Image (tube, grey):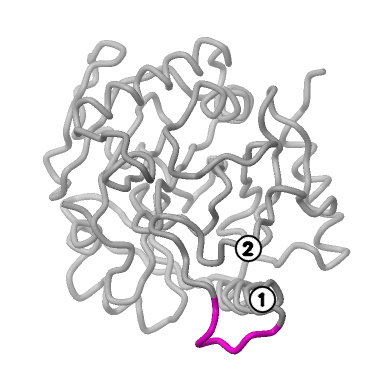
Amino acid sequence: MSTNWIEAIDARSAAALAAGALVPVQAEQVEMEDAGMRFIVRWVSSLAAKDASRTGAARAAQGGKAEDEKTVAIPGGPRDPNFNPFLNPDPALTVGTVGEAHVAILNKFPLCARHLVLARREFEEQLLPLAHSDFAALAELMGEAGGIGLYNGGTAAGASQRHKHVQWMPDDAGNASLQLFAPGLPAGLAEHGVATHPALPMWHCFVRVRCGRGEAAKAAAESLHAGFERACVELGLSAGEDGLLPPFNLLAGEGWLLAIPRRHEHFEGISMSAVCFGGTLYTRHREQIEAIRAVGPLRALAAVGY
């Protein structure tokens, strides 16, 4: 059955907001220019509620143990291995099934309107290599509505849950987008050709792919999956006991796939996930904006990569 995703997302969002199941976005933002590119840095005060919720869930999972007794997350895994919001997602936040393997869930603490999590319907480790079905779920959304696909491969890459999932954000002013980098990339590159961007001072790889609004979902999924495998080869991402190593971020949109290996999660206490490499950086505290301004967005991003 075909789904009008934007209508379904908006209807579920309205109901979830009215029921108090969805925490509305609360953000202030500033713009910064770096290497001729425009970056947005947002202070999202509602992220503090996410931290409080996660702490409460961790304590509840352990029968109310004190904070210093809480379970330590496995390397590259969740903040709390006993908490899985995606295995039986809140019906108030569930938009619908996507393809054969995923369910679309409203991000309870969204970074923007219509922010979706596309979680596998059966448990699978977040660090396992992305499969064709993961890209098929993204391609279905992107073929109808464009936007950007995001993946955080490991804690050092900003992942907060162990249950494998990708994320989707729509095209909108101020949202993450790979369009930021288009002027520095070869326009005529063939499908699955590889490029690097001269302004990015960290190890990375762009691969030309078929994805975006109007693309046939099946062809886009195949192109994205093959592009991901090409990026793994180019960057030397290899499978270990804990999944692909090193941890990495992946972004897909605007006809490109971008992969960035990661060393650290934080810059000056700011968690950097895939969305930050799309030109929109998020902080939990207003004063952290100045930490990014002091070095510039590109150096802040480079600090968590190689």
Q: Is residue 109 above or below residue 216?
A: below
Q: Residue at x 76, y 28 (%)?
A: 4
- Give the left or right position of residue 115, taking residue 135 as reference: right
Query: Tag on residue 62?
Result: 1
Q: Secondary structure at mark 2?
A: loop
Task: Assess whether mark 2 and mark 1 are in contact (beta carbons under 8 angstroms).
Answer: yes
Q: Is residue 250 above or below residue 305?
A: above
Q: Is residue 205 magenta?
A: no
- Residue 173 in the image: x percent, y percent? 50, 49
Which of these two is toward me, 193 or 121? 121
Residue range of the region highlighted in magenta in the rendering: 64-70
User: As shown in the figure, which amino acid type bears the numbered disc 2?
Assistant: Asn
Estimate how packed mark 2 is, as few (under 14), some (14 to 19) or many (20 or more) residues with alpha carbons within 10 Å: some
- Give the left or right position of residue 183, taking residue 242 as reference: left
Give the image quarter of residue 282: bottom left
Which of these two is toward me, 279 or 133? 133
Q: Is residue 101 above or below residue 31?
A: above
Q: Residue at x 52, y 43 (%)?
A: 125
User: As shown in the figure, which amino acid type bears the numbered disc 1?
Assistant: Gln
Q: Residue at x 78, y 25 (%)?
A: 3
Nearer the N terminus, badge 1 or badge 2? 1
Q: Which residue bears the numbered disc 2?
A: 82
